[in-house]
């Protein structure tokens, strides 16, 4: 009985500490704010989104061009996975700083990274 209680207490403690520790990549301002760096981050993120769109298009999901739920889910999931696996904290923070409605848009204007430049 004592070992069961100890095991449950330890598991609850680990779950609490894991839930309260937010990854550093998602901290606001965890990316550079100069124009050159933001342009590079925007270019990297757009390459990932375009690659995800092409992968989903060629796998039969038809990318964002079809505007279907399955196609959007494919692009969103593939993009999130690629950003996470890049292990680039600045790219992940930039990705999260973009508004959701343009985060996965492969044809978004440069206005969004420029807006982050003037956010300070």
Image: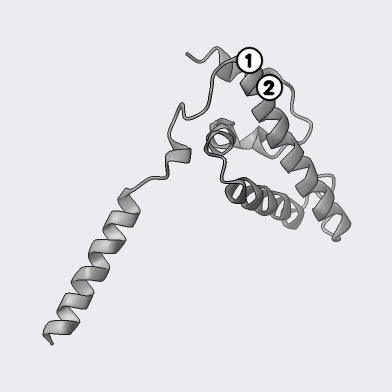
Q: How many marks?
A: 2
Horizontal arrangement in the rendering, residue 48 relative to residue 1 (left or right) = right
**Residue visible at 54% across and 18% down in the picture:** 33
Of all residues shown, which one is farthest toward the left? 2
Neighbourhood count class around disc 2 (C-alpha, 10 Å): few under 14, some 14–19, many 20 upward: some
Q: Quadrant of the N terminus?
A: bottom left
Depicted 85 relative to depicted 28: above or below: below
Horizontal arrangement in the rendering, residue 91 relative to residue 29 (left or right) = right
Report x, y in % for residue 42: 68, 28
Report x, y in % for residue 29: 46, 26
Horizontal arrangement in the rendering, residue 71 relative to residue 111 (left or right) = right
Q: Secondary structure at mark 1?
A: helix
Horizontal arrangement in the rendering, residue 30 relative to residue 109 (left or right) = left
Colour scheme of the rendered structure: one colour
Report x, y in % for residue 90: 54, 33
Report x, y in % for residue 66: 84, 49
Depicted 60 relative to depicted 32: above or below: below
Q: Which residue is mark 2?
A: 39
Q: Which one is nearer the viewer's eye here, 92 or 54?
A: 92
**Residue visible at 57% across and 40% down in the picture:** 88
**Residue visible at 85% across and 60% down in the picture:** 59
Q: Quadrant of residue 41?
A: top right
Neighbourhood count class around disc 1 (C-alpha, 10 Å): few under 14, some 14–19, many 20 upward: some
**Residue 112 visible:** no
**Residue 89 visible:** yes
Q: Which residue is mark 1?
A: 35
Q: Secondary structure at mark 2?
A: helix
Depicted 118 relative to depicted 66: above or below: above
Residues marked 1 and 2 touching at CB (< 8 Å): yes
């Amino acid at each position: 009985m004592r070992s069961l209680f100890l095991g449950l207490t330890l598991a609850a403690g680990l779950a609490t500490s894991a839930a309260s520790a937010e990854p550093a990549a998602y901290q606001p301002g965890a990316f550079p704010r100069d124009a050159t760096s933001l342009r590079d981050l925007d270019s990297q993120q757009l390459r990932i989104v375009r690659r995800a769109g092409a992968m989903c298009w060629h796998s039969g999901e038809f990318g964002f061009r079809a505007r279907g739920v399955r196609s959007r889910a494919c692009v969103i999931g593939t993009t999130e996975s690629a950003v996470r696996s890049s292990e680039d904290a600045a790219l992940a923070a930039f990705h999260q700083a973009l508004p959701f409605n343009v985060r996965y848009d492969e044809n978004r204007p440069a206005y969004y990274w420029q807006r982050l430049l003037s956010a300070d």
